Structures are given as structure tokens and as C-alpha cells.
């Protein structure tokens, strides 16, 4: 129950005006379909829906999975949803107008009208009931199959016990009961249509819940520039830099560069440059010092070589 | 709600069982728990957005929590008041009501009547062990019982004046023995006699009369055999002795009759050496910190020339004020203790976690000291979160070696 509720898709022209509007519900849905929903947990942007993640990846924004994997929750090698986005990645998606950012507003939550809420509860309970019926039928069939198999095995073996099993099988239709508490229930990862929908607001750069400081602006300029050049970027905290730069999708390539974002007027001590150069040469990646300059970005690469 | 997780998670209050928000969210992610709000189940997205905030548990802290729980550790919230201070532990106060009191008693020889007496006799034990006649503390006036007298015979060996006084109340500073006038027989020397003269009357307790001592049986126990070394051992010995000079082969040293004369001889020799000292070094206002030949080991030398006083990690800890930025978030217990883990009495944690991120500052010495002081004897680990990637760092105390062996 992850996707958006099914609606009529109204074809619209491409320019999307994202502002607080009083559009009809269907139009809202249509524009929403094409956009990626970014939800905020505090000040961290996150994606919850699989469709959103696919769209995001097709834009070249990688992000990082941080939740438990539903099928194997007790391991840390592979993680599952949500996809945590870096602030630069979220800003890029917003700037390209590929997404809309939404924040759950507490106040709006609680004073939601009672009618919609009780409707939601009713729908939920109806869904639960139909799921229960389905599972009853499936459980009964499963039990019959098991008994049949046991019976066949016993008939191949000794004679007497086969009859007891057959009797049980025949009595099964009457006596079988599937308790409610044994029902398997699905827990939604993303917020589904049943629960309350937060009010969506567009975020201009001033409204963003992400704190914007000098360093974020520098990093964002660099990120945008490298992304436009076709590189894929992920975080590089363990390598001492800001980004790891891949020539293609990270699943298929190793990183070629470690990008460190410095502003042009920032003073950098020589020992820092030495340290990052050493680090880069040890992990066989080229270090890029990136500085935004009047709309463009200037890159310097460091390479470690010995004097011959 | 049944399940194995109640053994390590949750708490009870007013008759109901509660879960912390991070525990509830983790269980939701594992698929063990469904949380209902207003009759509808919450999705995991709802859980993240509702349960995690700067007032409860932040997203970074939850990521660390989840990471550790998935690996099997038991993770609880850190409660600063649950850590007992060093003073409390010194007193061996019970951590909880159920723990039995166990006061340690170092000295067991004399019958101890009360705790106070126990503590004061402790001091006496150490003074005896050092073989010095330091000033003993004045016993409180109420301990005049025969218990004290039972100790008396032992101590009168050392305190000459007490033999006459027998005053349990005050104990003056005991006079030292005059070692220059007492000759101790050297039983280990080759020339030995089997009979020793009786010790001087003043050294013995009253009414004890000792005649000549026959020490032949005792001497028989001493191993006086010449050590037979193998050829290799003898060679090794010769090598060692080549550069070693026996102190007793010095004639002047042999002339010394006791330690005082020996130290005088050494001082005299030093003075003679100093006459050859360079003037520009030694006759000015500033003299060198150490003299050539004065020190016999690296550590002594470093001690003498070290003008910067070195500090240990635990110095000044009590004066540190708690900081807002650096806080311990969790207690972590090892996974193999899960079977015996009791929520009411969890014991000492394996480590304590402080959560931070690469975007923030590196903890400075003040922060590291303050956190380790807060955590007492449990090591503190820093969990650094970088967009889903978690790295763990810890700081270890280290001392530079000062001596070469």
C-alpha cells in the first residue's frame, strides 16, 4: 500500500507552479504524480516511496538507505527504506522542480475533521476484515494439503493409522477455525492513503527547514555543477572529504575523485592539504579542491608523486 | 503484548508497560510491533516523524540505536544519576537496595572491635610494612579497652619508651633505633660463628632473658653451597662482570663501617669531581639542571630536566562543568549477556555512546575529559553518523615511555 491512490491522470503542460493553491483534487494529484515527495524528519529530507526512489535515481541523485530492511531486519549489511537525502540533493530536486517538499504539521493533524478520520478508520477495519477472510481460506487449504500429504505417506507405510488421518480430514471443514490473533498484518513503510495526509507546502529557499549556511551554499554549488556534468556523488565522510565522485552509477563504478569544497577566500593550512593528498594517494583517488566562483566552479586536483 | 523483547526493552510505570519511542520504532521496523494512534496503525514514516525529535531522540541517535540493536547489543538510555561517583565506590555503598554490603578489611590480625579501629589499624599496618617508626595517629580516647593492650606486645618491640610507659592513650613519636651502634650479625658471610651473642637488654621486651643463640640449625637451612655453573653460564657471567665493578672491591668502600660513612664517601667523591666543573656553567646564576653522572636511569634524568610538568588524564576532572554540546546518549551491553540481562539490575555497561556527526566539531580535550568523568569507569565511544554510515571512535589514554630497559 505504498503508491498513491488511483486517480484520473489529467495531462498538463510541463511548467509546474508550485505554490499554495486551491486547485481541484485531481489536478493536485496529477502534479503530485510527477513529483517526488520529500518528507522531513526534523531537518533531514527523506524519501519513503519506492516510486519516488526510482524517480530520484533516474535524476542521478543517489542518497543513502538508512532503515531496517523489511525482509532481514537484524543485519546492517543491507539497509532498507527510508532513503535519506543530503541537503544538497534535496535542494537540487527542489530547484529542478522535480519534487515537492512536505512537512507534517502538528497542529493540522489533531484538529482534522472527525468525519474524514472515522471514514479512514472504517476503511481500515474493512480492509482488515477482508484480509482475514482471505487468510482463513488460505489457511484451510494449507492444512488440507498437509493432511493429505501425511495421509499419502502413511498409506505407503503401515495400514491402520491412515484411517485416523482421513477422519480428521473429513472433519476439517466443520471444525477448522482460524483465530483472529493469528492473522498476518502488514505494516506500511510509507504513509498510506488511510492515515492523515500532511498539508503540502512549497518551499522557497528561505522557508526550507534545512539550515542554510555558507558551507552548505558552497557545497550545493559544487554538487549542482558536478551533477550537471554527469557525475554521481555520494557522501565521503570516511575519506575526509565532502563528496565521492563517480563517473557513473555507484553500483557499477568505483569513485574516481574525492571532492573537498572550499570557498575561494578560505585559508587552508598546508598541512591540511598534505593530509588530504596523502589520504587520496593511499586510497587511489584523486583529490579535487572545488571552489565556486561567480556562478562557475573552479577545480584543482592534487596528485601525489615523488621527485625523481 | 508478548515477546522476548520485554526482557531487554521497555519499562513499567503505574502498572502498565511502556516502551521508549526509539524502542517502539525499532520494533516497528523489525515487524514485531504495531503502534496505534486514534485507532489507526502508524506507518514507519509516521513513526520516524513523530517519535524522533530533539526533545526525545534525534534521528542520528536513533540510527546509532538501530545499528547496535540490529547487531544484537542491548542499548538503554543513559541516566546520569545512575553512575556512582568514585567516592561512593570507595565507600562501597550498595548500588541498589538488593546488593549486600561488603566492607573490605585490609587488616585481620588484631581483633577489631569497631570500624573506626579497623581504619586506624590499617594505617599501622602500612607503617609496619615500611619498617619505619613514623608517627602513629592518636587513637580516639574511647578505645582504651584490653583490645588495645593485646596489640601492645608487638609494638613494644619498636617503641622503646612504651616499654616503661604502657600508656594506651597517648603515643608519642617513637624514637628511632640508633643503627650505628647496633651491629647486626652477617649470617651469610663465609666466616661465621655458630653461636651468636645475646642481644642488648634494651632491645628486648621486659622480663625476657635470652642467652646465647645457637643458630647452627638455622644456618643449616641457608644454602651456602658454591654455585656450580655450566661453562656457558660461566662465560656469560664473565661477560657481565667485565664491565661491572664490584662495589666491595674498592678499598675505600671497604673501610666504611656503615651506610652513613658510605654516603659520606660518595659525597666526598662527588665534591672532588665538581672541582673540575666548567666555570661558565656552574658559577653563574643559572646552573644546569643535572650533573654528569648524577642519574642512573633515563627516568631520573627526564625527571630532573623536565621543566614542563606532565599532567595525567584524570587531573582536574572534578572541576569540569557539564557541557551542552556533548552528552552521553546510551549505555550499551554486550550481546552475549542477553540471556542473563535483568532490567532492574543491568550491571556495568560495556561502553557508553556519545552520538555526533562529521558535520560537527571533533571533541576537544575538555569534552573528552568531561564525558569520561561522567562515565567513571566505563569507556566512552563516539558514534559518528555520516548520512547513514556510522563509524565508532574511542580515545585511549596513553603514556609516553620514560625509561629504556
Image (cartoon, rainbow, N blue to C red):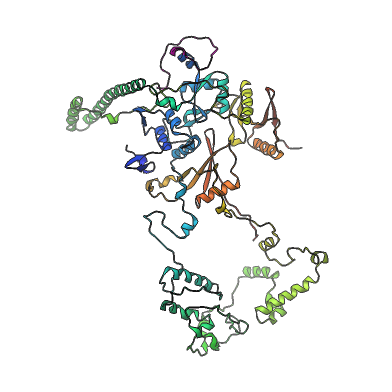
Question: Residue visible at 70% across and 40% down?
Answer: A271
Locate residue A264, reporting x and y percent: 70, 30
Bounds of the magenta segment: A1-27
Q: Kindly indicate the quadrant of the structure image that contains residue A60.
A: top right
- Main secondary structure of the magenta stretch: loop
Question: Residue visible at 66% across and 61% down?
Answer: B299
Residue A156 appears in view: yes
Q: Quadrant of the C terminus of chain B?
A: bottom right
On screen, B165 above or below B245? below
Question: Residue visible at 45% across and 15% down?
Answer: A29
On screen, B272 above or below A186? below
Q: Nearer the viewer, residue A156 or B316?
A: B316
On screen, A215 above or below B239? above
Q: Quadrant of the N terminus of chain B?
A: top left
User: How many numbered marks does the figure carry?
Assistant: 0
Q: Kindly indicate the quadrant of the structure image that contains residue B278.
A: bottom right
Left or right: A201 in relation to B295: left
Residue A6 is inside the magenta segment:
yes
Amino acid at each position: 500500500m505504498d503508491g498513491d491512490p488511483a486517480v484520473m491522470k489529467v495531462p498538463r503542460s510541463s511548467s509546474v507552479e508550485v505554490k499554495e493553491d486551491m486547485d481541484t483534487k485531481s489536478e493536485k494529484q496529477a502534479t503530485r504524480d510527477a513529483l517526488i515527495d520529500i518528507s522531513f524528519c526534523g531537518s533531514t529530507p527523506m524519501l519513503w516511496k519506492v516510486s519516488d526512489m526510482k524517480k530520484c535515481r533516474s535524476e542521478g541523485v543517489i542518497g543513502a538507505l538508512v532503515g531496517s530492511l523489511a525482509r532481514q531486519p537484524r543485519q546492517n549489511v543491507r539497509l532498507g527504506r527510508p532513503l535519506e537525502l543530503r541537503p544538497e540533493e534535496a535542494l537540487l530536486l527542489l530547484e529542478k522542480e522535480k519534487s515537492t517538499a512536505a512537512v507534517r504539521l502538528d497542529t493540522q493533524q489533531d484538529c482534522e475533521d472527525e468525519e474524514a478520520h472515522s471514514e479512514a478508520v472504517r476503511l481500515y477495519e474493512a480492509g482488515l476484515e477482508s484480509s482475514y477472510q482471505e487468510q482463513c481460506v488460505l489457511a484451510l487449504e494449507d492444512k488440507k494439503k498437509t493432511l493429505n500429504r501425511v495421509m499419502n505417506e502413511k498409506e505407503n507405510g503401515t495400514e491402520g493409522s491412515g484411517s485416523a488421518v482421513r477422519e480428521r480430514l473429513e472433519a476439517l471443514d466443520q471444525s477448522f477455525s482460524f483465530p483472529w490473533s493469528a492473522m498476518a498484518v502488514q505494516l506500511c513503510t510509507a504513509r498510506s492513503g488511510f492515515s492523515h495526509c500532511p498539508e503540502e507546502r512549497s518551499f522557497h529557499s528561505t522557508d526550507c527547514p534545512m539550515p542554510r549556511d555558507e558551507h552548505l551554499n558552497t557545497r550545493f554549488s559544487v554538487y549542482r555543477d558536478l551533477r550537471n556534468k554527469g557525475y554521481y556523488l555520494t557522501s565521503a565522510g570516511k575519506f575526509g572529504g565532502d563528496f565521492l565522485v563517480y563517473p557513473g552509477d555507484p553500483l557499477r563504478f568505483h569513485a574516481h575523485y574525492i571532492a573537498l569544497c572550499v570557498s575561494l577566500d578560505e585559508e587552508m593550512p598546508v598541512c591540511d592539504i598534505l593530509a588530504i593528498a596523502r589520504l587520496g594517494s593511499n586510497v587511489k583517488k584523486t583529490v579535487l579542491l572545488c571552489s565556486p566562483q561567480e556562478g562557475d566552479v573552479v577545480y584543482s586536483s592534487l596528485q601525489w608523486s615523488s621527485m625523481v | 503484548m508478548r515477546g522476548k523483547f520485554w526482557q531487554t526493552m521497555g519499562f513499567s510505570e503505574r502498572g502498565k508497560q511502556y516502551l521508549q519511542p526509539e524502542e517502539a520504532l525499532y520494533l516497528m521496523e523489525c515487524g514485531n510491533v504495531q503502534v496505534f494512534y486514534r485507532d489507526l496503525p502508524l506507518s514507519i514514516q509516521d513513526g520516524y516523524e513523530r517519535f524522533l525529535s530533539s526533545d526525545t531522540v534525534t534521528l542520528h541517535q536513533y540510527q546509532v540505536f538501530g545499528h547496535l540493536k540490529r547487531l544484537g547489543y542491548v542499548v538503554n538510555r543513559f541516566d546520569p544519576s545512575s553512575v556512582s561517583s568514585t567516592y561512593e565506590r570507595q565507600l562501597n555503598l550498595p548500588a541498589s537496595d538488593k546488593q549486600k554490603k561488603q566492607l573490605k578489611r585490609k587488616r585481620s590480625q588484631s581483633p577489631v572491635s569497631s570500624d573506626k579501629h579497623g581504619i586506624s589499624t590499617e594505617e599501622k599496618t602500612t607503617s609496619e610494612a615500611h619498617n619505619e617508626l613514623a608517627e602513629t595517629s592518636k587513637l580516639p580516647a574511647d578505645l582504651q579497652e584490653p583490645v588495645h593492650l593485646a596489640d601492645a606486645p608487638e609494638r613494644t618491640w619498636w617503641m622503646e619508651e612504651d616499654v616503661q610507659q604502657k600508656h594506651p592513650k597517648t603515643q608519642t613519636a617513637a624514637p628511632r633505633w640508633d643503627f650505628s651502634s647496633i651491629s647486626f650479625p652477617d649470617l651469610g658471610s663465609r666466616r661465621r660463628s655458630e653461636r651468636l651473642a645475646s642481644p642488648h637488654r634494651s632491645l628486648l621486651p621486659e622480663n625476657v632473658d635470652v642467652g646465647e643463640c645457637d643458630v647452627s640449625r638455622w644456618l643449616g637451612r641457608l644454602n651456602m653451597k658454591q654455585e656450580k655453573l655450566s661453562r656457558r653460564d660461566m662465560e656469560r657471567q664473565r661477560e657481565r662482570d667485565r664491565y661491572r665493578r664490584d662495589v666491595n672491591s674498592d678499598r675505600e668502600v671497604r673501610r666504611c663501617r656503615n651506610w652513613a660513612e658510605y654516603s659520606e664517601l660518595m659525597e666526598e667523591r662527588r665534591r672532588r669531581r665538581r672541582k673540575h666543573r666548567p666555570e661558565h656553567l656552574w658559577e653563574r646564576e643559572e646552573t644546569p639542571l643535572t650533573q654528569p653522572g648524577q642519574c642512573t636511569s633515563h627516568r631520573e634524568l627526564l625527571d630532573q630536566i623536565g621543566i614542563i610538568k606532565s599532567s595525567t588524564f584524570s587531573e582536574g576532572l572534578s572541576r569540569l562543568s557539564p557541557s551542552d554540546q556533548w552528552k552521553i546518549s546510551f549505555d550499551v551491553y554486550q550481546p552475549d549477556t542477553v540471556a542473563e540481562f535483568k532490567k532492574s539490575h543491568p550491571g556495568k555497561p560495556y561502553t557508553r555512546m556519545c552520538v555526533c556527526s562529521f558535520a560537527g566539531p571533533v571533541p576537544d580535550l575538555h569534552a573528552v575529559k568531561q564525558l569520561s568523568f561522567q562515565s567513571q569507569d566505563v569507556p566512552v565511544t563516539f558514534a559518528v553518523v555520516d548520512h547513514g554510515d556510522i563509524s565508532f571512535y574511542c580515545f585511549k589514554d596513553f603514556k609516553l615511555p620514560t625509561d629504556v630497559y
